[in-house]
Amino acid sequence: MDKNDSSALERSRLLQLSFLYSVPIGVLGGLIGLGGAEFRLPVLAGVLGYSVRQAVPLNLAVSLVTIAASLAIRGSTLSFSSVIPLLPAVLSLICGAVITAFFGAAMAGKLSNEQLERIILVLLVLIGVALIVEGFLPQQIPALLPSSLAWRIGAGILFGLAIGLVSSLLGVAGGEIIIPTLVFAFGADIKTAGTASLLVSLPTVLVGVVKYASRGAFANRAALRNTVAPMGVGSVIGAVIGGMLVGVVPASVLKVTLGVILNISAFRVFHKAKSHNS
């Protein structure tokens, strides 16, 4: 087999794996109301063979595709009127998130691979623990923040700063943080929080993608064709299927299970990578 045939086979394998892994991840994300990007990252780094520095912006690009598709789907089936009372919180979250999404992408470029892997491992474990805890919490509780507009705007900006940083360092939409924040801090119901989360995520992820692009992260067009495109399509298909299956398995059970799986996969991929670098 000559080099061209081998290269074509490798491209075909990458394209197929990208699609096949993204569909079940999208289904699980759809079932619990998240995009699944936190589960895509270990696949990109551990299965598809990308370095962590390549995997994060690619994950962010797939997240952008899935957010845009999710917003289009929600816009055709749901009204955004329920989000209007949450607009001060949503806008303040966006303000904070886009700032750190910009600087987070720049910071990631200055970190060594080992430092980036260590940070990603910690963040994925924290998200896994948060999913487990959230599985045992009620779907809606009274807002923990005072109803004062000043309080909500100030807290929204602070939460947004954390959300944007996590988004840019992991390449995720941040729904795993945004939704609990809206539910528990601002008293939103889970469905409204899901819609509002997409509105916060879109500009946050877009800023991260633009910043990574300016640093040359998407110069490899083959990665966009063979990984981002099939993963984006597979994630959207999976999310639609997951949305149709909501209620088949209790979301709380899924969150606990997926939190455990995320912790295991994060340790397997990023702790191993850190050990190899040592």
Image (spheres, rainbow, N blue to C red):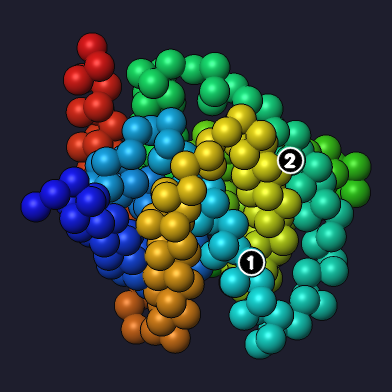
Q: Answer with left or right where residue 20 lies relative to residue 190.
A: left
Three-letter code, disc 1: Ala
Q: What SS does tag 1 mark?
A: helix
Mark 2, residues whose alpha carbon is within 10 Å: few (<14), some, or many (≥20)? many
Q: In which quadrant will I find the C terminus?
A: top left
Q: What SS does tag 2 mark?
A: helix
| Residue 185 visible in the current orientation | no
Q: Answer with left or right where residue 98 lies relative to residue 239.
A: right
Which residue is rendered at x = 47% and y = 53% of the image? 224
Which residue is rendered at x = 45% and y = 70% of the image? 233
Residue 90 vs residue 167, the one in the foreground: 167
Question: How far across and how far down the image is residue 185, in percent?
Answer: 68, 50
Question: How far across and how far down the image is residue 271, in percent?
Answer: 25, 28
Which residue is rendered at x = 39% and y = 21% of the image? 113
Mark 1, residues whose alpha carbon is within 10 Å: few (<14), some, or many (≥20)? some
- The correct choice, above or below, for 192 with respect to 186 in the image is below
Question: How far across and how far down the image is residue 265, in percent?
Answer: 25, 44
